[in-house]
């Protein structure tokens, strides 16, 4: 049944026994799926580049956090809609805080509290796990009638992760690099299309040619047309090679400056400018 209305304790125990909200990498099973919860903005089911499994995101902002995390070299695993188990623990935390624990609509059954995104860091950093709750700033601002209740629920999550010495981050549109998320998504599909892997043999030469072809006033469309001509491929294939080179950090573009557009020049980093102007540096 959908994890929305009228859930019984037996339902919850069945979901937990099924492994929902548990596991790692390709074996992880989100506790919530797109069908379970009304989305804020567009929901998304998308194939993960790091995990190779379908990820379920309930808003554009959650998806944006995922894309930024996916590009980060030091993130090894991304688990969304992560169940805070054991089930009874968040109930005890709520009781200790004097907060009413949220229940499934139409029932008195306490919900399984979930954290939007849990990151497992790939390096040997001080914090191997980071928990991220995602909210629009308007949901927690003074003047929003439901802000107090939203903050109470977030406090339950925060305390849960504090018990485990895991950093907990509240991500809103104000602290997510939105241009970076948009620009990575702009090219992200090029990394997912395995049927185009035969183009990878062009990557080394493509990167060199990009450096020789790029000009500050050349639109992305014009740039792709020139690169396609050099390699005798379609502009679509040139777009794929460019996207893969950017995601693989073979070409250094400025992901944060502006949102990429086909009719606008592609911004590159200051380091690229230096190399372009002084090839011997």
Image (spheres, rainbow, N blue to C red):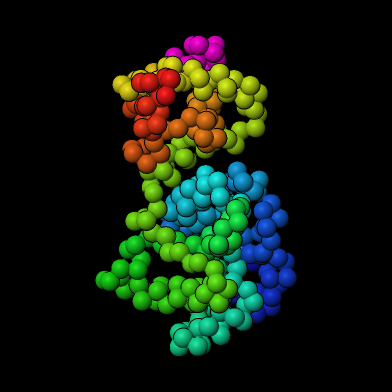
* Towards the viewer: 119 or 121: 121
Tell me the quadrant of the picture where the N terminus can be found: bottom right
Residue that extends furthest to the right in the rendered view of this protein: 17
Query: How many numbered tags mark residues here?
Result: 0
Q: Is residue 126 visible?
A: yes
Res. 279 image quadrant:
top left
Q: Is residue 209 left or right of residue 217?
A: right
Residue that extends furthest to the left in the rendered view of this protein: 143
Q: Is residue 79 visible?
A: no
Q: Residue at x 44, y 16 (%)?
A: 212
Q: Residue at x 50, y 27 (%)?
A: 242
Q: Is residue 174 left or right of residue 7?
A: left
Res. 40 image quadrant:
bottom left
Q: Position of residue 140 (x, y in %)?
A: 35, 68
The stretch in magenta equals 223-234
Q: Is residue 207 left or right of residue 15?
A: left
Q: Position of residue 103 (x, y in %)?
A: 53, 78
Q: Position of residue 66 (x, y in %)?
A: 51, 51
Magenta-colored stretch includes residue 144: no
């Amino acid at each position: 049944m959908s994890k929305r209305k009228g859930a019984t304790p037996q339902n919850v125990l069945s979901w937990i026994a099924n492994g929902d909200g548990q596991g790692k990498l390709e074996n992880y099973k989100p506790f919530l799926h797109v069908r379970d919860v009304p989305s804020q903005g567009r929901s998304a089911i998308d194939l993960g580049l790091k995990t190779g499994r379908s990820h379920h995101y309930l808003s554009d902002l959650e998806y944006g956090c995922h894309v930024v995390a996916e590009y980060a070299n030091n993130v090894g695993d991304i688990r969304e809609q992560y169940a805070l188990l054991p089930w009874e623990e968040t109930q005890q935390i709520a009781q200790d805080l004097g907060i009413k624990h949220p229940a499934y609509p139409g029932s008195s059954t306490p919900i399984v509290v979930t954290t939007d995104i849990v990151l497992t860091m790939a390096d040997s950093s001080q914090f191997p796990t980071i928990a991220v709750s995602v909210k629009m700033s308007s949901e927690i601002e003074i003047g929003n009638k439901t802000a107090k209740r939203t903050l109470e629920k977030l406090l339950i999550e925060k305390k849960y992760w504090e018990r485990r010495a895991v950093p907990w981050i509240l991500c809103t549109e104000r602290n997510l690099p939105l241009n970076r998320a948009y620009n990575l998504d702009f090219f992200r599909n090029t990394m997912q299309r395995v049927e185009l892997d035969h183009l990878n043999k062009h990557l080394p030469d493509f990167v060199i040619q990009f450096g020789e072809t790029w000009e500050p006033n050349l639109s992305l469309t014009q740039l792709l047309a020139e690169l396609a001509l050099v390699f005798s491929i379609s502009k679509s294939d040139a777009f794929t090679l460019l996207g893969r080179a950017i995601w693989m950090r073979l070409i250094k573009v400025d992901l944060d400056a502006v949102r990429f557009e086909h009719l606008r020049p592609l911004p590159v980093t200051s380091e690229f400018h230096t190399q372009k102007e002084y090839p011997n540096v």
